[in-house]
Amino acid sequence: MSQPVETPAAAPAMEPLFGEPDKPVRKRRSRAKELLEGSNEPQREAVLHEGSPLLVVAGAGSGKTRVLTRRIAYLVSERDAHPGSILAITFTNKAAAEMRHRVADIIGNRARIMWVSTFHSACVRILRAELHRFGYAREFSIYDDADSKRLMQLVCSDLGLDPKRHPVRKVLNWVSNCKNDLVDHESAGSRAGLGEESYPEAYAQYQLRLRKASALDFDDLIMLTVHLFQAFAEVREHYRRRFRHVLVDEYQDTNHAQYVLIRELCGPSDAGAAAPAPTDQEAPQEGAIDPPELMVVGDSDQSIYAFRGATIRNILDFSTDFPGARTIMLEQNYRSTQTVLSAANAVISHNDGRPAKNLWSAAGDGDRIVGYVADSEHDEAQFVASEVRELVEQGRGTYGETAVFYRTNAQSRAFEEVFIRTGVPYRVVGGVRFYERKEIRDVIAYLRAIANPADDVSVRRILNVPKRGIGDKSEGAIDALAQKAGIPFSEALRRASETALAPGSVKKITGFVDLIDEHRQLVADGAPAHDVLASILDRSGYHAELQGSKDPQDETRMENLAEFLAVAEEFATQASTVDLDGAGAEPNLVGAPEPDPSLPAFLERIALVADSDQIPDAESGGVVTLMTLHTAKGLEFDTVFLTGCEDGILPHQRTLTDPGELAEERRLTYVGITRARKRLYLSRAVSRSAWGAPQHNPPSRFLGEIPDRLMDWRRLGSAVTSWQNSSATARYRERNRIEGFASRVDSPRAKKSIELAVGDKILHTSFGLGTVKKITGSGSNAKAEVDFGSMGAKLLAVQFAPIEKLD
Ligand SMILES: Nc1ncnc2c1ncn2[C@@H]1O[C@H](COP(=O)(O)OP(=O)(O)OP(=O)(O)O)[C@@H](O)[C@H]1O
Ligand SMILES: [Mg+2]
C-alpha cells in the first residue's frame, strides 16, 4: 500500500547547517559562504545549480540529503525564493520536520510555510482544496492499511472469493499495484493473470465502497492528484505557478504514479514540449510560465521498494523525461569508514547491469567488521546485547548511537527478550505500532465516524464498542436495509425503525446515532479535536469501561489513551502557533498551513503518521533502535548490527529463486551496511526456531561476497555447525539448547520457588515473553494463565514450567 517511510531521526543524517544551532542568525552576506562551507565541488554545484532539471545520483552517505537541504536554504536566503514556493518531498513526515527545522535556522519561522512533506501529505493538501471537482465532500476520510484491509475483506466475501486461494492481502496488493501504475478499475482487466480473473471486479467494488464512504486509501491520494492535474488544466497550472522549486529525496523509490505527478508539475509545459530547456535568464512570459526548477536525488543501488511499484526507471530515464536535465555525481562518502564502504561496494558489485560507482571515504580504515556465528537466535541476541553493553561501559559508544537491523519484524522478539533481561534500553520501530493498538483504533474510528458521516467502516467498528446491546443481529438488519435502499450504513441507522428489529434494539441504535450527532455538533461549533476526543471517551462509556476493568492490560490501554489525548492537545497548540507572517507576504498562496486545530485537520495528521516516525530523537531517546532494514533507509548510526545474515532470512526465502528479487535483497543489504559510521557487526544463527520447529539456514550468500581481509570473525559456531545435518544432530542440538537455557533458568528456581502475581512479566524458554493474566491454586499446585502475545495464551504450572520472572 503506501510506501512505508523512514527518517533521519534517531541519528539525523543531517548536520546543523551552521556550527551551533543556537548561534544568532548571521548576516546575509556570509550565509552563502557558510552554506557551502565544507562542501566538495560537485556538492557546491548541486546547491548552486539554476534552471534546468537536476539529478544528483550518488552512493550512500555521499551527502545527497545534505545537499538537498542546503539547496533549500540557499534558494530562500540567496536566491530570494519565497518559502511558500518550495515543495520538498521527503520519505517520512519526520524527515520533513527535520528538514524544515534546519532551514528555519536560517530563515526563521517563515520556513513553516514551505511544503516539506511526503508525497502523501502533499497530495492530501492538494486534494482537500481541489477534490470537490470530482464530486467528493471536503471531509473525506483517509483509510490506512488496516482500514483498507477491512474494506477489501467485505468485498472479497461479497464476491465469494476463497480466502485460501485469494488472501485479502494479495487482492489488495494487486489493486495497489494497479493504482501505483495509474491503472483504474475500468482498464485493469488486462492485468489480471491466471487465477486473478475476479480481481478487476474486486477493484471496482472496492473503489465503489470507498467512494460511498467518502474515503481514499493511500494509493488513491497520489492517483487522484494525478487525475486532477490531468483533468483540470487550470489546477495543474495553478500548482505549477505556485511551486517554483520542487525537490525530491530518495527518488529511486518513487513509483510510476509519483513520477507522473512530478512530471505534471515540472515537465515541459504542453505547448512547449519541444522547446529548449528553460534557463533562469528567460523572463516568464504572459500566460506561459517556465516549469518549476526540479532537483531529485537518489541512488539506484538503494532501490528497495520495487515490490511496491517503485522503479529505478525513474532515475535511469530522468534525462529523457525531463529534457535538458543535468546530472551531478557525488563520489566521496562522509559517513562511513573505508572498511564499511569496501564491504558495501563488494556486495553491491555482484548486482548486474549497474553503472560502476567509485565511492570512497577519507575517514580511514577504522575497525574491521565483526562477524559472529551464533548457535541460535537467542545466542545471537545475547551476543548483540553483551557487545552493546561493553561498548557503552567502555565509553566507546552510546545506546542511542546503536541500531540492530533485521529482515523481518518477527526477528525482533529474540532481541527484545534478551534486552529486557539484560537491561539494555531499546525501542522497536515498526513493531506493534501505537496507532495500531486496539484502543487507539477504536477512538480514531469514533472520531472518523463523527467527522465523516459516510465512513461505514469506522461506524461499524464502534457500533457496539463498548458493548451497548447492538449485536450482530441488529447490525445485520441495518446492513440489509442499507443494501436494499442503496444508502450508506450510517444513514440506515437513522431509519432503524423501518427494520423488523424490536423497539428495544431500535432505541439502542437511536442512542448511538444521537451520541455521534451530538459530537458532530461540537465539531460544527468549532470545538478543537482534543475536546471532541475527551468528550467522546467520556460520553461513549469507553473510558468508564476501561476504568472499571480489573484486567491490567486495560490499565495500559488507559495510559495509551491518555497519551493519545496528549497528542491531540499538542496538535492543537502547534496548530495555533503557526506563524503566518510569510504567508501574509503573498496572499495568493494557497495551501500554507492554517492554524487549524479542528477534528478533520487532526485526523488528517494522524492518518499520515508513519510507523518510523516513532523513532526517538537521539537527545531524548538514548536507547538502542531495533528496526527492519527497510525502515533504516536514510539513517545513520555509529554502530550497526546487521543480524540474521542467512540464506532464507537475508536474502529472504521467497527471493532465492528469482534473480530480480535477489538483486533487491542485495540492495537491501547494501542499505543496511552503509548505515554504519564506525562499527559494523554481521551475525547469523546456525539454528533458529520458525513456526515452532528449528530451521537451519546456510550463511547468507552476501557474507561470502565480502573480502576476508575486512572481516574479524569472533566466532565461527560450535563444533556442530553443519546446517545440512538437519535431522538427528539438529534435534539433539535444539534439545540441548532448550535444556541448557532451561537449566540456567532453573537454577535460581531450585533455590527459591517462584511467586507470580497477575500482571507480572515472565520469560518462558519456548514461548518467550509473556504477561500473567490469572493465577489459580497455590504452592506446587499454582497455575498461571499467561498471555504470550503472538504465541497465544498458555496455562502453566508455575513451579515446573521453564520460566523466569522478570523485574
Ligand atoms: N561535505 C561534507 N562535509 C562534512 N560532512 C558531510 C559532507 N557531506 C555529507 N556529510 C555528512 O555525511 C553524512 C551522510 O550525508 P547524507 O545523509 O546527506 O548522505 P546521503 O547521500 O543522503 O545518504 P543516503 O544515501 O544514505 O541517504 C551526514 O552525516 C552528512 O552530514
Ligand atoms: Mg539521504
Image (cartoon, rainbow, N blue to C red):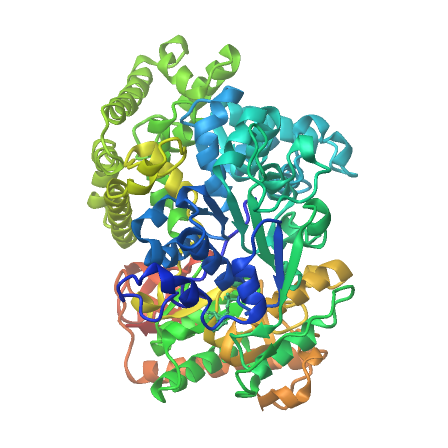
Q: Is residue 196 left or right of residue 492?
A: right
Location of residue 8 in the rendering, given as x and y in whole percent from the top left corner: 45, 62
Location of residue 59 in the rendering, given as x and y in whole percent from the top left corner: 62, 68
| Location of residue 397 (image quadrant) | bottom left
Q: Nearer the viewer, residue 73 or 671?
A: 73
Image quarter (top left, top right, bottom left or bottom right) of the C terminus: bottom left
Q: Is residue 33 left or right of residue 347?
A: left
Q: Is residue 542 left or right of residue 679?
A: left
Q: Is residue 620 visible?
A: yes
Q: Is residue 192 left or right of residue 267?
A: right
Q: Nearer the viewer, residue 764 or 2?
A: 2
Q: How many marks?
A: 0
Answer above or below: position of 89 versus 631.
above
Location of residue 65 in the rendering, given as x and y in whole percent from the top left corner: 51, 61
Location of residue 680 in the rendering, given as x and y in whole percent from the top left corner: 53, 80
Q: Is residue 159 visible?
A: no
Answer above or below: position of 424 versus 474.
below
Answer above or below: position of 52 versus 366.
above
Q: Nearer the viewer, residue 355 or 570?
A: 355
| Location of residue 352 (image quadrant) | bottom right
Q: Nearer the viewer, residue 627 or 589?
A: 589
Image quarter (top left, top right, bottom left or bottom right) of the N terminus: top right
